[in-house]
Amino acid sequence: MQFLSDNAAAVHPAVWRALQDADAPDAPYDGDRWSARLDAAFADLFGQPCTALWVATGTAANCLALAAMVPPHGAVVCHREAHIETDEGGAPGFYLHGAKLLLAEGDGALLTPASVEAVLAGIRPDVHQVQPQALSITQASEYGRAYRPAEVAALGALARGRGLRLHMDGARFANAVAHLGCSPAAASCAGGVDALSFGFVKNGGMGAEAVVFFDPALAAASHQRRKRAGHLQSKGRFLAAQILALLERDLWLDNARAANAAAAELAAACPDRLLHPVEANEVFVRCTAAERAALRAQGFGFYDWGEDAARLVTAWNSPAAAVGALSRALAAL
């Protein structure tokens, strides 16, 4: 009964069908009829023109988006626990050719205008210090917290006022939108997001993510950067087909709702143990080493999160029986 990560979830049957349908001769790279539909599909979803590129991983999606915004001599402001800082093996420095990450604070891995300003205030506007060029936020955050539309807009206004671009790491964007009950645009581009890394692998995909540019100027060189980074796959139709299958009839949102509901069930079983409000599909609970061992002895898989905590992650297909069993086990601790 695994609650390690939604990265390990099964591929949705609709994605398998789409992959099989795409298994026919077509133009290579991104010249196929599936890839050609991506811009329009995302424009319909967000209600504005945009350019979308498929890539294989979330790390590549984040870094290609940031590479369009930040020169090698620049910097990105992000949370101290942002995925680009803690879990991408230095990839931002690699893709951005040495650009720096400037780390800000914030409860629940959420940034606020005040926490960003605290970082910016210490930077002199001269040649001796690295100058920030972009702000990166995560929707939902690394602790499963969702930025409200007004919070995104406040950070967007700060970014514009400071001459910064705004990037959103949306590895669990679907889960945040499902929790907020708002439009995808309200949770992102309506608040000033310039580029979004739209996650699909955690939400029923097999191996496809999207970089969505809301500013055409940023997208201009990104096709070349994708090729140079080794992410222009020769059979790109298989990546595009996955994305289109999950966008069709809002399957991406239905999957996220299912994962969120499973997380909510776990949270309800141990409300006094919650380290963070549960606003997506991650549950962080206080749990001693002995309690974690007891849970594992019952067959539950999950990651330790520090000395006295555990992270439980649900997925679009988390079995109801396993979720129920873990709920009962948590309540019985």
Image (cartoon, rainbow, N blue to C red):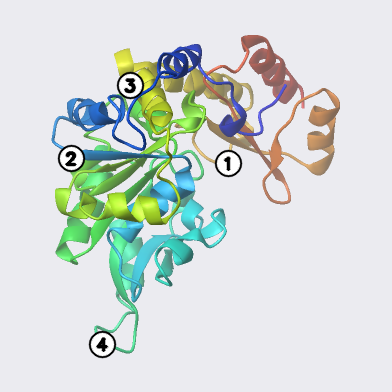
Identity of the amino acid at label 3?
A: Leu
Dot 4: few (<14), some (14–19), or many (≥20) neighbours within 10 Å?
few
The image position of residue 244, as x and y in percent, is: 34, 22
What label sits on residue 247 in the rendered view? 3
Disc 1 on helix, strand or loop? loop
| Residue shown at the point (37%, 26%) measured from the top left | 243
Identity of the amino acid at label 2?
A: Ala
| Residue shown at the point (36%, 29%) measured from the top left | 240
What label sits on residue 190 in the rendered view? 2
Measured in 3D between alpha carbons, the distance from the residue under mark 4 to the one under mark 3, in whole angstroms, is 45 Å
- Whichever of labels 4 and 1 marks the residue nearer the N terminus, that label is 4
Dot 3: few (<14), some (14–19), or many (≥20) neighbours within 10 Å?
some
Disc 4 on helix, strand or loop? loop
What label sits on residue 275 in the rendered view? 1
Quarter of the N terminus within the rendering: top right
- Whichever of labels 3 and 1 marks the residue nearer the N terminus, that label is 3
Measured in 3D between alpha carbons, the distance from the residue under mark 4 to the one under mark 2, in whole angstroms, is 32 Å
Measured in 3D between alpha carbons, the distance from the residue under mark 3 to the one under mark 1, in whole angstroms, is 33 Å
Measured in 3D between alpha carbons, the distance from the residue under mark 2 to the one under mark 1, in whole angstroms, is 30 Å
Measured in 3D between alpha carbons, the distance from the residue under mark 3 to the one under mark 2, in whole angstroms, is 19 Å
- Whichever of labels 3 and 2 marks the residue nearer the N terminus, that label is 2
What label sits on residue 126 in the rendered view? 4
Of badges 2 and 1, the one in the foreground is 2
Quarter of the C terminus within the rendering: top right
Is the C-beta separation of discs 3 and 2 under 8 Å?
A: no
